[in-house]
Amino acid sequence: MKVLIVNRKSIIPVFKYGGTQRDIYAQGKELAAMGHQVSYLVKKGSRCPFGDIIEYNPGQSLQDQIPEDVDILHFHDRPDEPVDKPYMVTVHGNGKPQEEFDINAVFVSQNHAKRHNSKRYVYNGLDFDLLGKPNLSHPRKHLLFLAKASRKIKNLKGSVEITKQAGKKLAVVGGKKLNFNPKIRYYGMLGGDKKNQVIQNSEALLFPVLWHEPLGLAILESLYFGLPVFGTTYGSLPELISEERGFLSNSKSELARAIRENENYKPEKCHQFIVDNFSARKMTDDYLKCYEEILNGHNLNPDKPKSIITEKEEPFSMSE
């Protein structure tokens, strides 16, 4: 099968921040390993050892940039004009109020799909080769904040307050130093082995987000390294975090207490959950099932998905 993966705002590969770019790179790598022919329509500056790169030209129509021999297009952005090839669309973000999506759209978690009046989702998958084999008995030194700290919805401020209440230290990956605090270390944007090592040295991930998280790549990576997750109850978190993998609450004091009592979580169970459910191979297998449906003339949804819950309809907050 000849697959064209489309994400016109992305450069691949990505080495630091960029979840969608990592998803599409891992997906293409797996497709190629299965014997499929992979090409990417992405921004100038991209490169790929296992597939062809087509540099997206914003001054040219999308249709004119699609090779004639492609069997199916997989959009990881939103198509803004008709195409004459079979295609599907992965939606990575949250829709605006009553926003409609393509009939062949899929989402990245069950909750994400439900909030857009759909039942179709494919979980993101991790390329375990890039993460390496974790040392699940490695000494743990601090809590971890892993997100783009400048986004208020990621709630670095709340993470700092929870850390203080728990009497712990905090490593911040994804943000610059905001103020002097000897118990907080800011690493900035990290990628590759440097990021993996900071995760490996952490005892738990703090993820008190103030929005409906579609999935949360930081959650998957942290669980892979054996970290339980302590976060809020919004978005995908309840379907990812069970009692044996962490604790969810919208109360800072309850999260701090659970962190102080962090003795019941087994790194092996956190890690195995990811290995069983969130590999790049499983993600790609699930996408291939979608391709088959589409190539057989079926739509992935009975009706166009539509955003039915928005941030404006629900206050996102944490109690003390």
Image (cartoon, rainbow, N blue to C red):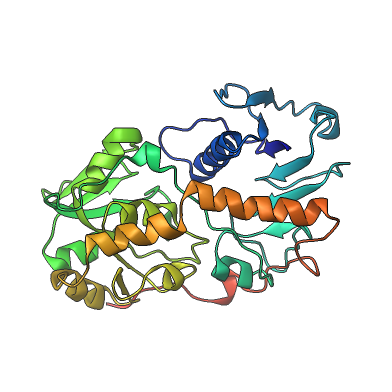
Q: Quick check: can you spot residue 179?
A: no
Classify the position of the N terminus by image quarter. Answer: top right
97 vs 156: above or below: below
Residue drawn where x is 70% and y is 55% of the image: 290
**Rendering quarter of residue 104:** bottom right
Depth order, front residue of 42/292 = 292
How many marks can you see? 0
- Judged left or right of residue 100, residue 136 is left
Residue drawn where x is 29% and y is 41% of the image: 196
**Residue 10 screen position, x and y as percent:** 59, 34
Q: Quick check: can you spot residue 31?
A: yes
- Judged left or right of residue 168, residue 245 is right
Depth order, front residue of 307/136 = 136
**Residue 110 screen position, x and y as percent:** 56, 69
- Judged left or right of residue 313, residue 209 is left
Classify the position of the C terminus by image quarter. Answer: bottom left
**Residue 311 screen position, x and y as percent:** 56, 69
Residue drawn where x is 22% and y is 76% of the image: 253
**Rendering quarter of residue 160:** bottom left
**Rendering quarter of residue 153:** bottom left
Depth order, front residue of 40/32 = 32
**Residue 65 screen position, x and y as percent:** 80, 28
